[in-house]
Image: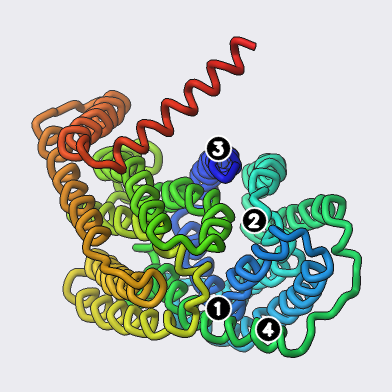
C-alpha cells in the first residue's frame, strides 16, 4: 500500500511540476520580451530575499508532519485536532512575523542591488508585493501538511495544476497588454491565496475533525516547540544554502548577472522540483516505515531509495549539462548564456543536491532534531566561507562551489548521525554506494560532453535534440554497465516490472 500511494503521489506531483515548469518558461519568455533583463533579475533577487525571510517558519512544517504520522495511523481524531489547532495558530503567527520582518528590511532593499539604475520607490513597491505574497501563503498552508502526512499529496497536485494554469494565462494576458510588472505581481498574490483557499476547503471536507477546538496539553505543546527550536538551525541552513546564490551574485558580481544565471536556474529548479517529487511522494511511507523500528530493513530501504533517486537524477543532470546552453541561446539569446565550466558546476550541484534526499527524509522523521542542528551550523559556515572566498576569484562558479562543499559536509555528517545514533551500526555500505554514484555520475557528465564536443551542428533545434539523445542513452548505457550487478539495481527493475504487469492487467480487464 505504501508503494502504491508513493507512486500515485510521485506521478501526480511530477505532472504538476512539469506543467508548472512549462508555464514558468512561458512566463519568463514573456517577461524578457516585454519588460527586459532588469525585471527578470529583480524577480530572481527578491524571490531569494523573501525566501530568506521565510526562515520564520522555523521548520514547523516538518514538525507538523512528524507529529501527525502516529495519530493518522491510529485514526486518533482528537490528537489530530489538537495538533492542527496548534499549527493553525503557529502559522498565523509565522505569517505575521514574516510580514513584520519584511517591513523592517524594506528601507534597505536597495543595498542588495548593484550596477543597475532603478527608481527607489518602484524598487520598494516590487519588494513589498513579493512580501505580501509570501506572508499570505502561510495562512492556510498547514492543511497541506496534513494531506502530505496522510499520503495524499496527489490531491494538492491536482488543484495546483488547475489554479496555476488559469492564473498563468491571466498573467500573460496582462503582461502583453499592459507591460506592467506590478500588475503581474498582484496577480501572483491572488493566485497564491486562491490556491491555499481551495486546498483548505478540500481538507475541511475530508477531515471533519478540523472543526474541533481541542487544545494540545501543555507538556506535549512544549515538546513540539522544543523540536521546532532544534530544527530551526537546520531550516536556517537550508535557506542559506538554497536561497543566497542570487543575493551573493547581485552584491559580488552584479544584479544583471542574475538574469543569465536565472536562465539556468529556470531549468535547474524545475528539475529539482520534479526530482524532489520522489522525496515528497515517499515521505509519508518513510514515516510509516520508521514507526516499525526495523533498523536493518530501514537501511535496505534507504539504499534502494538512494539508488532509485540517483538513476533519473543523473540522466536529468547529463541532459541539463549538454542541452541547457543551446536551449537558452535559442529561447532567450546569447546574452543569457554562461560559460560551460559554470554549467558543469551547476550540474554537479544538482546531482549532489538530489541524491541526498532519501537520507534527509529519514532524518526528518527520526526525531533527531536536536542532534542535527550542529551539522547545519557546520554546513552554513562552509557555504559562506567558500562562497565568499571563491566568489571573489571565480565569480558565479565559486559561489556555486560553496554550495556543493556545504552539501558534501552536511551529507557526510548526517550519515554518521543517522547510522550511529539511530540505526546503531556501520554506514560503510551506504557510503560505498554513494561514492560509486557520485564517481559514475561525474564520469557520465564528462563522457556526454566529450561526445557532444565532436559534433558540430549550427541548427539549434537539431543540436538540442541530438545532444539530448546522446545524453540520455549514453548515460543509461554507462550506468547499466557499471551498476547492473547491484542488488539495488535488481530491486528497481523488479519494481518496474511489477508496475508494468499491474498496468497490463488492468488494461486486459
Q: CA distance from mark 1 to mark 4?
A: 10 Å
Task: List the residue tagged with mark 4.
Answer: 97
Point out the tag, 1 or 2, that comes first from the N-terminus: 1
* Horizontal side, residue 189 vs residue 334: left or right: right
Point out the tag, 2 or 4, that comes first from the N-terminus: 4
Q: Is residue 320 visible?
A: no
CB contact under 8 Å: marks 2 and 4? no
Task: List the residue tagged with mark 1.
Answer: 55
Task: List the residue tagged with mark 3.
Answer: 11
Element at label 1: helix
Task: List the residue tagged with mark 2.
Answer: 148
Point out the tag, 3 or 2, that comes first from the N-terminus: 3
Q: Is residue 229 visible?
A: yes
Element at label 4: helix
Q: Residue at x 21, y 80 (%)?
A: 389
- Viewer-proximal residue among 363 and 100: 363
Amino acid at each position: 500500500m505504501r508503494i502504491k500511494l508513493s507512486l500515485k503521489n510521485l506521478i501526480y506531483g511530477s505532472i504538476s511540476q512539469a506543467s508548472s515548469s512549462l508555464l514558468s518558461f512561458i512566463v519568463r519568455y514573456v517577461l524578457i520580451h516585454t519588460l527586459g533583463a532588469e525585471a527578470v533579475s529583480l524577480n530572481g533577487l527578491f524571490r531569494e530575499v523573501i525566501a530568506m525571510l521565510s526562515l520564520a517558519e522555523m521548520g514547523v512544517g516538518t514538525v507538523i508532519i512528524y507529529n501527525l504520522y502516529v495519530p493518522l495511523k491510529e485514526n486518533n481524531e482528537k490528537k489530530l485536532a489538537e495538533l492542527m489547532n496548534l499549527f493553525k495558530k503557529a502559522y498565523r503567527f509565522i505569517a505575521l512575523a514574516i510580514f513584520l520582518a519584511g517591513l523592517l528590511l524594506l528601507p534597505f532593499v536597495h543595498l542588495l542591488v548593484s550596477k543597475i539604475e532603478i527608481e527607489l520607490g518602484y524598487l520598494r513597491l516590487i519588494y513589498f508585493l513579493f512580501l505580501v505574497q509570501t506572508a499570505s501563503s502561510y495562512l492556510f498552508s498547514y492543511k497541506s501538511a496534513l494531506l502530505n502526512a496522510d499520503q495524499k499529496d496527489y490531491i494538492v497536485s491536482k488543484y495546483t495544476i488547475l489554479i496555476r494554469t488559469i492564473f498563468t494565462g491571466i498573467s500573460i494576458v496582462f503582461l502583453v497588454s499592459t507591460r506592467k510588472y506590478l500588475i503581474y505581481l498582484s496577480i501572483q498574490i491572488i493566485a497564491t491565496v486562491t490556491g491555499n483557499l481551495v486546498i483548505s476547503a478540500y481538507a475541511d471536507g475530508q477531515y471533519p475533525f478540523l472543526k474541533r477546538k481541542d487544545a494540545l496539553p501543555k507538556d506535549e505543546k512544549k515538546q513540539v516547540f522544543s523540536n521546532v527550536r532544534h530544527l530551526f538551525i537546520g531550516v536556517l541552513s537550508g535557506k542559506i544554502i538554497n536561497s543566497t546564490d542570487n543575493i551573493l551574485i547581485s552584491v559580488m558580481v552584479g544584479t544583471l548577472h542574475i538574469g543569465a544565471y536565472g536562465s539556468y536556474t529556470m531549468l535547474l529548479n524545475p528539475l529539482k522540483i520534479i526530482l524532489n517529487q520522489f522525496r515528497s511522494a515517499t515521505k509519508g511511507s518513510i514515516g510509516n516505515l520508521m514507526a516499525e523500528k526495523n533498523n536493518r530493513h530501514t537501511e535496505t530501504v534507504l539504499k534502494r531509495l538512494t539508488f532509485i533517486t540517483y538513476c533519473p537524477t543523473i540522466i536529468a543532470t547529463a541532459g541539463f549539462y549538454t542541452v541547457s546552453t543551446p536551449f537558452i541561446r535559442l529561447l532567450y539569446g546569447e546574452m543569457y548564456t554562461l560559460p560551460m565550466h559554470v554549467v558543469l558546476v551547476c550540474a554537479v550541484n544538482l546531482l549532489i543536491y538530489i541524491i541526498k534526499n532519501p537520507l534527509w527524509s529519514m532524518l526528518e522523521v527520526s526525531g533527531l532534531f536536536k542532534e542535527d542542528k550542529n551539522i547545519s551550523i557546520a554546513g552554513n559556515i562552509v557555504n559562506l566561507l567558500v562562497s565568499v572566498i571563491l566568489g571573489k576569484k571565480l565569480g558565479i562558479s565559486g559561489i556555486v562551489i560553496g554550495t556543493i562543499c556545504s552539501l558534501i559536509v552536511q551529507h557526510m555528517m548526517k550519515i554518521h548521525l543517522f547510522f550511529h545514533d539511530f540505526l546503531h551500526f556501520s554506514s560503510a555500505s551506504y557510503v560505498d554506494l554513494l561514492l560509486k554514484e557520485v564517481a559514475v555520475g561525474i564520469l557520465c557528465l564528462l563522457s556526454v560532453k566529450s561526445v557532444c564536443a565532436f559534433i558540430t551542428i549550427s541548427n539549434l533545434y537539431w543540436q538540442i535534440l541530438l545532444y539530448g539523445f546522446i545524453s540520455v542513452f549514453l548515460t543509461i548505457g554507462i550506468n547499466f554497465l557499471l551498476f547492473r550487478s547491484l542488488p539495488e539495481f535488481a530491486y528497481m527493475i523488479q519494481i518496474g516490472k511489477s508496475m508494468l504487469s499491474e498496468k497490463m492487467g488492468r488494461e486486459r480487464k
